[in-house]
Image (tube, rainbow, N blue to C red):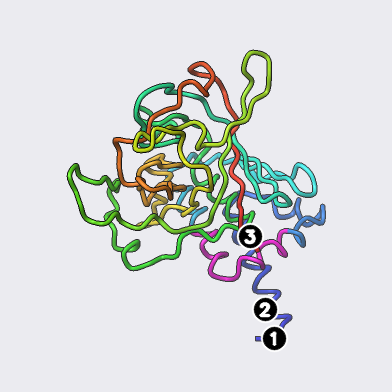
Amino acid sequence: MSSAKSRQAVQNLTLCGLRFLGVDVFFLTQHRDLLAWSRLMRRFGFISLFALCIIASAGAQSSPTNEPVLQSLDDHTFQLGDVTLDKSDHSIRFPAELILNSGLVEYFLVATNGKTYESLLATSARPYHIHLAMLLIGSKSAPVTPALRDAPSVPFHINRKPGDTNPPPPAVAGDPVSIEISFANAGRSQTLSASDCLRDLSTRTNAAPGPWTYNGSRVVRGNFLAQRDGQIVAVIDDIDALVNNPRPGHDNDQIWEINSNALPPLHTPVQVTFKLLQHP
């Protein structure tokens, strides 16, 4: 294929992805944003472009038809529903609420249709908007292995059984990301890493600092499972959550406790930020 035809193919695929997102393509071309988006999409390659279209259409199956448009806020910042993405900083942010402030948890963050009874935070942001935003800033997500492809499509969660002496399963693969929450507390702005919000009872300290793993969930029979189940950041292995915990004990649901002393009052609104730590 000639370079001109290759460029045209990439542009056509870009337009396909943008249309799935509900973007007014005429508006973009008139405002000279299409070229910038084409360059951004070319960085993903053809496979990731198709993945973008598949995720957008799969997520739309379980969403209202009146979807928000991808809006340009400035040269580097875009809005998709409740999610703001910054392609220069390789980060996204969205609102959430503190819904638990004590006890054991299996999730750090879920959507409002997720397991809110065992999550520190809940968000109104749609999981497939979060995933599309992560793709647009450069995430490649987890490689599709046979084990991942063949895993059950029912809500699939891995817990180590008490007394199990076998080696722990490997952590879910994907892109390293940092996770922070920001909030106002007693009139002051405060930012915490996700690990500061949790305690590891096996070490009796805060959860180990360091990145989390953005694996990106799965599409099964046309359904984007993170959107269907509402799971976003899992503390205990959940291949259909968008993000997983790579720390030792990621398969043990008896050791991850909310660090109550670090957190603001219950129902405090927070801003969640994911930042991609490795990018093209």
* Quadrant housing the N terminus: bottom right
Indicate the secondary structure of the residue bearing disc 3: loop
- The residue at which mark 3 appears reads as 279
The mark nearer the N terminus, 3 or 1, is: 1
Q: Do the residues labelled 3 and 1 touch (CB within 8 Å)?
A: no
What crowding class fits label 2: few (fewer than 14 Cα within 10 Å), some (14-19), or many (20 or more)? few
Instruction: Decide which of 257, 50 is in the foreground and name it.
Output: 257
Q: Are marks 2 and 1 in contact (CB under 8 Å)?
A: yes
- Alpha carbon of mark 3 to alpha carbon of mark 1: how far? 28 Å
Mark whose residue sits in front, 3 or 1: 3
- Alpha carbon of mark 2 to alpha carbon of mark 3: how far? 24 Å
- The residue at which mark 2 appears reads as 6
Indicate the secondary structure of the residue bearing disc 2: helix
**Residue name at image x 65 percent, y 46 percent:** 91
Specify the quadrant of the image occupied by residue 117. Answer: top left
Kindly identify the amino acid type of the residue bearing the numbered disc 1. Ser
- The residue at which mark 1 appears reads as 2
Query: In this rendering, would 133 be left or right of 100?
Result: right
- Alpha carbon of mark 2 to alpha carbon of mark 1: how far? 6 Å
Q: Position of residue 273 (x, y in %)?
A: 60, 39
**Residue name at image x 71 percent, y 49 percent:** 89
Name the dominant secondary structure of the magenta segment.
helix
Vertical relation: 80 (above or below) 97: below
* Quadrant housing the C terminus: bottom right
218 in the magenta segment: no
**Residue name at image x 35 percent, y 36 percent:** 106
